[in-house]
Image: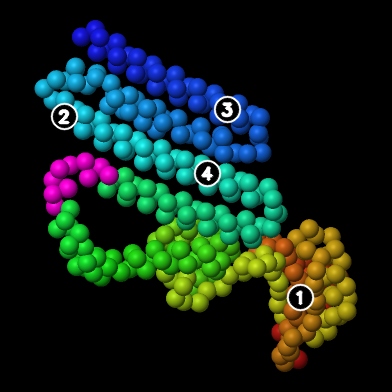
Amino acid sequence: MLWPLASLLTAVLATLLAGWLVDQILQRLATRHPDSPVWESLRRCRIPLQLSLLTAILLASPFLRRVFPSQDGVVRHTALLALIASLGWLTVRVLTAALEAVFARYQTVTEDASRIQRVETQLGLVRRVGSAVIWVVTVGALLLTYDAMRTVGASLLASAGLIGIVAGIAAQSALGNFFAGLQIAFSDTVRIGDTVVLEGQQGTVEEITLSYLVLRLWDYRRLVVPVSYFVSKPFENWTRRDPGLLAWVLLHLDHRTPIDALRAELERFLATTDLWDGQEWSLTVTDTTPSTIVVRAMMTARDPDAAATLKLATREHLLAHLGTHHPESLPRIRTT
């Protein structure tokens, strides 16, 4: 038994040495090329690479035959299954590392946030689809190693049409969401990081998969919506082309309100806050009632979060200013 044990120990040491050498090479490449993140991402492939090398060495060496002479076929078949599974795992890791490197590289060549969000969404779905395809192929390769699966292969192919029809009917919703996810990724209707309004709920797109989309609402709740919703029903996307947004505030004031003075105060306030993007602003009287006038203040902000904060700050400031300098402008009920 000394020779088989020595062979096993040699195979394990060779696998560990090969994994260590590959990791060192990738680490040095990552140090020399810090602007290329693919080398650092490939270091996560060390474990599946070592498993693939170990099972390949065991299959190529006479170790299994000598240690398990009576069950050599079963043991070798198990090692073959492990080799196929580890190769599938390695391929998924390599694909993930390559897509992460592509996205990191794209972030360095453009500063357009909308394009970065679009590419992030597309690459995320490509990664999920590619990983699913790789695992399906891996499972198929695992099944084909069994003689029984080869025997029934012809009948399975002959009935593939009927099975496909039945599966299509049974999985109609899942397939609809699958193709809707692909359509969303490449039609640029909604992306990760977009602010959308869905049936009165405002939220930020946090995750897009092939079956559902996750919205982070203003109170940090998560709204999970099927992706097919976004290709069949209307919704508001506040940041599809430009994250800038027009914020507005309505004030019900007394008829004696000095509009010019209030307009000048709004201009002064906007010049002192970083929430305003410096593009547009206005203050106008939009309506009158027997007891009040309706004043609308509008101003632009760089994104929806800044717009919401700017609305609150503007309303508080204008009301405080009127209460201090023009208290007669606040609405009141007249009895005479």
Q: Nearer the viewer, mark 2 or mark 4?
A: 2
How many angstroms separate mark 3 from mark 1 (CA)? 57 Å
Going by the image, does 3 lie left or right of 33?
Answer: left
The secondary structure type at the circle numbered 2 is helix
Chain part drawn in magenta = 141-152
Quadrant showing the C terminus: bottom right
In the image, residue 150 lies in the stretch drawn in magenta: yes
Q: Mark 3 or 1 closer to N-term?
A: 3
How many angstroms separate mark 1 from mark 2 (CA)? 81 Å
Name the front one of labels 3 and 1: 3
* Neighbours of disc 4 within 10 Å: few (<14), some (14-19), many (20+): some
As shown in the figure, which amino acid type bears the numbered disc 2?
Gly
First of labels 1, 4 by sequence position: 4
- Quadrant including the N terminus: top left
Across and down, in percent, residue 304 comes to 65, 64
Kind of element beneath mark 4: helix
Q: Is 278 drawn above or below residue 21 in the view shown?
A: below
Q: Which mark is residue 27?
A: 3
